[in-house]
Amino acid sequence: MFQYPTFAQPVSKKLMAPAISRMPSAAEAEDKGQLTHQLIEALGISKAVEAAVENSGAYFKNVPAESNAVLQKKIATLYLDAEKKFNAQKEQQRNQVLADIKQQFVNQFSLEELKYLIVLSKYPVYRRFQTFLDSEQYRDLMGKPFITSREAVTKLKSQIKELKASATMNQLNK
């Protein structure tokens, strides 16, 4: 079993052998990079990232209203300048997110697993399954416990309010 050396231990080749043997070769790393790119395309992740970056600019459209016209103009200018800066960085943001996802896939999956995921992503049944997991219907189902607990707490608050009102009335009647 591999043990990480402590600072007090000298690092021996025998101790590091398991870690070194697990390091992918340059060819395997290149293959994993190519397969990861294929998987990202097969799953439509590039398009999703593009949409996310585009849609994230919507935050700059809601400029806070101010009754003072001079202040309103300054605020609008600040928002406009920030939006321009954001738009200038969209391509960089998109590339960084995709690079981060790619790196996560490279770290998480073996060469064989990446190949399997690419094949799996092409099957219509898997695509339907993934579409369901991404659907509003699925999110609604997953949200039911939260809705139920929120309703229960709302009911509790109402009961507590009635209890307080009843306690107040009892104190007044004494």
Image (tube, rainbow, N blue to C red):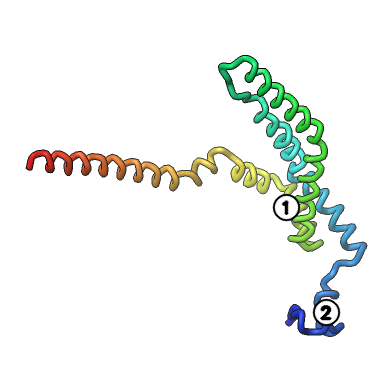
| Mark sitting earlier along the chain (1/2) | 2
The N terminus sits in image quarter: bottom right
Report, in whole angstroms, how far the alpha carbon at label 1 lies from the one at label 2. Answer: 36 Å
For the residues bearing labels 1 and 2, Cβ distance under 8 angstroms:
no
The answer to which of 91 and 148 lies nearer the viewer is 91
Is residue 99 placed above or below 52 in the rendered structure? below
**Residue 86: which quarter of the image?**
top right
The answer to which of 124 and 1 lies nearer the viewer is 1
**Three-letter amino acid code at the position of disc 2:** Met
Specify few, some or many for label 2: CA neighbours under 10 Å numbering under 14, 14-19, or 20 or more.
some
The disc label shown at residue 162, or none: none
- Pinpoint residue 126: horizontal percent, then vertical percent: 67, 48
Is residue 107 placed above or below 54 in the rendered structure? below
- Pinpoint residue 119: horizontal percent, then vertical percent: 77, 52
Q: In the image, what residue occupies the spot 69% across and 26% down?
A: 79
Is residue 5 placed above or below 66 in the rendered structure? below
The answer to which of 7 and 41 lies nearer the viewer is 7
| Element type where label 1 sits in the image | helix
Q: In the image, what residue occupies the spot 76% across and 57% down?
A: 116
Q: Is residue 3 left or right of residue 34?
A: left
| Element type where label 2 sits in the image | helix
Q: Is residue 58 left or right of residue 89?
A: left
Q: Which residue is mark 2?
A: 16
**Three-letter amino acid code at the position of disc 1:** Leu
Q: Which residue is mark 1?
A: 120
- Pinpoint residue 11: horizontal percent, then vertical percent: 83, 82
- Pinpoint residue 98: horizontal percent, then vertical percent: 78, 46
Number of numbered discs on residues:
2
